[in-house]
Amino acid sequence: MCLAIPACVEEIVAEDCAIVNLSGVRREVSLALVENVKPGDYVIVHVGFALQKIDPSEAEHTLALFAEMQAQNDPFSAE
């Protein structure tokens, strides 16, 4: 099973590379597979490649679901 995560583009660093924010972690990813990406856009990232742009509200909803799943699996969270 593969997992791709929404990430916010923070900075374009080369013609086909960008710095994205993955839940607070900044990473450089390839933009070779997507067009017209600019800072503030959300992209789906898998193994260092942005696969497609995604609507910001959908990205935020997906990230909220990931956070909720993580909180439910945290043995130290208060329930």
Image (cartoon, helix red, strand yellow):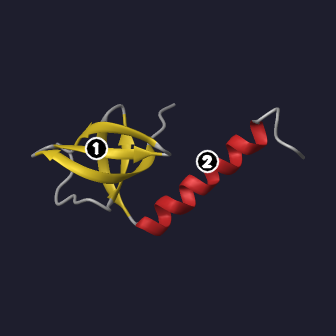
Give the number of the mark in front: 1 or 2.
1
In depth, the one of 78 and 64 nearer the eye is 78
- Where is mark 2, residue-wise? 66
Task: State left or right for residue 23 relative to residue 65.
Answer: left
Q: What residue type is labelled 1?
A: Ile
In depth, the one of 61 and 18 nearer the eye is 18
User: Residue 35: x percent and y percent?
Assistant: 17, 56
Name of the residue lying farthest toward the left: 15
Q: How many labels does the image show?
A: 2
* Residue located 21% across and 51% down the image: 34
User: Residue 41: x percent and y percent?
Assistant: 32, 61
Helix, strand or loop status at disc 1: strand
User: Residue 64: x percent and y percent?
Assistant: 61, 56
Q: How far apart are marks 1 and 2 (CA)?
A: 21 Å
- Indicate the quadrant where residue 30 lies: top left
Task: State left or right for residue 8 relative to residue 38.
Answer: right
User: For the residue carrying disc 1, how many other residues have a C-alpha within 10 Å: few (<14), some (14-19), or many (20+)?
Assistant: many
In depth, the one of 75 and 50 nearer the eye is 75
User: For the residue carrying disc 2, how many other residues have a C-alpha within 10 Å: few (<14), some (14-19), or many (20+)?
Assistant: some
Helix, strand or loop status at disc 2: helix
Q: Which mark sits nearer the N-terminus, 1 or 2? A: 1
Name of the residue lying farthest toward the right: 79
Residue contact between numbered discs 1 and 2, judged by CB atoms under 8 Å: no
* Residue located 90% across and 46% down the image: 79
* Residue located 69% across and 45% down the image: 69
User: Residue 32: x percent and y percent?
Assistant: 17, 42
Label ID, residue 57? none
- Where is mark 1, residue-wise? 19
Q: In this view, does 63 lie above or below 45?
A: below
Q: What residue type is labelled 2?
A: Phe
* Residue located 68% across and 41% down the image: 70
Task: State left or right for residue 58 relative to residue 49.
Answer: right
